[in-house]
């Protein structure tokens, strides 16, 4: 079938807008008939393993970093995450009872495929989370889990990222069930929150106007810092990656707690700081990081929810308010403003959003 922009100005805009629909598909695909548990296409046993090694590149690597929090917190499963180009040449020892999990939109990234081949015969099992079921990575895995995002044309990954997160979270819930670390009720509860994600994402998409206004401010900057804690740290990394990929503005991300160990030296009125912080147990700590930025003349774009916004009043340069969501699902929701912020900054700068210079959709050579 011919893929068109469906009335959008760019494929990236279309793919951002499609997320409620494709995430809904992915959730339905892995949900049991009664809706209370996760069903994998084939039996897979997480109870008999001691660790998970996750390997990927680019945006898929940030999906892995997010999933580490989920597998560790929900399923008490130790996780190691690595960049494929590092992993393959470091030739790390693979301990007994290790499962290796590869995440790739295309399923053809050369470094990720080489890392998979390195694990063949060393890891207990090879799993993959892919968008292309016929891909090399899918074919060479013991079990390949499709993310069902549909064709992604924009070079900067958007819907594939949130579908990767969705499938990885469901996999972590399966692991939690098998390892007995969450009760059946707790799992059913998380799954019902997952089913509500498409509606919540639609509400988030309604914030596009406020996000575009913040993006116009960012488009004047030459450097932007992203901060986040916990599940928001990998998302800050992804937000910075999106921004640099398509707007060519230098952006980097730090775990909020690391601000004082270096990047605070850079803060002045010319370098905006994007803070991603839902109102959770760590919010107070994030607010004090924000105050450290404000005290040095820094300008903050705060992405939070209504409770978070109420607490910080008007101290931010601009506040973007997300709907409430189960804390475990914040990465899927907050990906939307991170993507839209990068998108509208690029549009304001007039760069080639779908085909950014020097980048390729799929890197099949080294
Ligand atoms: C390229 C793309 C990125 C993607 C990365 C990994 O750099 O531009 O959007 O995240 O490759 O690709 P994969 O297909 O393995 O997910």
Image (cartoon, helix red, strand yellow):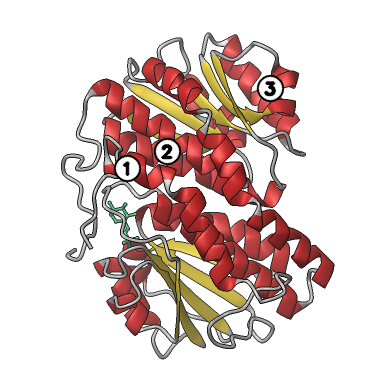
Nearer to the camera, 190 or 271: 190
What separation in Å lies between label 1 and label 3 (alpha carbons)?
Answer: 29 Å
Quadrant including the C terminus? bottom left
Mark 2 or 1, which is nearer the eye?
1
Q: Which residue is mark 1?
A: 12
Q: Which mark is drawn over residue 309?
A: 3
Q: Quadrant of residue 16?
A: top left
Nearer to the camera, 32 or 55: 32
Visible residue check, residue 202: yes
Query: Does residue 78 appear left or right of residue 89 in this picture?
Result: right
Q: Are marks 3 and 2 in contact (CB under 8 Å)?
A: no
Q: Is residue 140 above or below residue 324?
A: below
* Residue at the image position 75 percent from the left and 27 percent from the top: 307
Query: Does residue 5 appear left or right of residue 122 in this picture?
Result: left
The number of numbered discs placed on residues in the rendered structure image is 3
Q: Are marks 2 and 1 in contact (CB under 8 Å)?
A: yes
Visible residue check, residue 64: no
Q: Secondary structure at mark 1?
A: helix
Q: Secondary structure at mark 2?
A: helix
Q: Which residue is mark 2?
A: 339
The single residue placed furthest to the bottom in the displayed view is: 121
In the image, is the residue at mark 2 within 8 Å of ligand 1 by its beta carbon?
no
Query: Does residue 202 appear left or right of residue 76 in this picture?
Result: left
Q: Label 1 crowding class (10 Å Cα cut-off): few <14, some 14-19, many 20+?
A: many
Mark 1 or 3, which is nearer the eye?
1
Q: Which tag, 3 or 2, sits closer to the chain's start?
A: 3
Q: Find residue 109 and report its horizontal and vertical position in percent.
A: 27, 66
What separation in Å lies between label 2 and label 1 (alpha carbons)?
Answer: 9 Å
* Residue at the image position 51 percent from the left and 64 percent from the top: 26
Q: Secondary structure at mark 3?
A: helix
């Amino acid at each position: 079938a011919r893929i068109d922009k469906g009335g959008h100005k760019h494929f990236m805009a279309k793919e951002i807008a499609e997320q409620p629909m494709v995430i809904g598909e992915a959730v339905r695909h892995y949900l049991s008939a009664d809706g209370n548990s996760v069903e994998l296409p084939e039996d897979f046993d997480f109870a008999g393993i001691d660790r998970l090694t996750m390997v990927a590149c680019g945006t898929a690597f940030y999906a892995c970093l997010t999933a580490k929090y989920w597998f560790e917190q929900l399923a008490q499963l130790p996780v190691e995450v690595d960049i494929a180009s590092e992993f393959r040449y470091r030739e790390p020892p693979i301990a007994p009872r290790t499962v290796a999990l590869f995440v790739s939109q295309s399923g053809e990234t050369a470094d990720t495929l080489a890392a998979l081949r390195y694990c063949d015969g060393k890891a207990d099992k090879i799993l993959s989370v892919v968008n292309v079921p016929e891909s090399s990575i899918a074919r060479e895995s013991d079990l390949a889990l499709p993310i069902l995002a549909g064709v992604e044309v924009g070079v900067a990954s958007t819907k594939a990222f949130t579908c990767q997160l969705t499938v990885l979270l469901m996999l972590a819930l399966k692991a939690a069930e098998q390892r007995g670390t969450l009760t059946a009720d707790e799992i059913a509860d998380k799954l019902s929150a997952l089913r509500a994600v498409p509606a919540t994402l639609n509400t988030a998409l309604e914030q596009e106007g406020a996000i575009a206004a913040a993006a116009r401010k960012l488009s004047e900057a030459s450097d932007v810092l992203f901060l986040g804690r916990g599940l928001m740290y990998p998302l800050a990394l992804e937000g910075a990656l999106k921004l640099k990929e398509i707007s060519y503005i230098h952006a980097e991300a730090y775990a909020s707690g690391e601000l004082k160990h270096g990047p605070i030296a850079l803060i002045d009125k010319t370098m905006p700081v994007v803070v991603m912080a839902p109102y959770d147990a760590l919010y107070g700590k994030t607010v004090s990081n924000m105050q450290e930025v404000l005290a040095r003349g820094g300008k903050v774009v705060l992405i939070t929810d209504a409770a978070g916004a109420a607490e910080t009043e008007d101290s931010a340069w601009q506040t973007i308010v997300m709907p409430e969501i189960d804390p475990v699902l914040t990465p899927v929701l907050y990906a939307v403003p991170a993507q839209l912020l990068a998108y509208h900054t690029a549009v304001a700068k007039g760069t080639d959003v779908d085909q950014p210079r020097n980048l390729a959709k799929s890197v099949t050579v080294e």
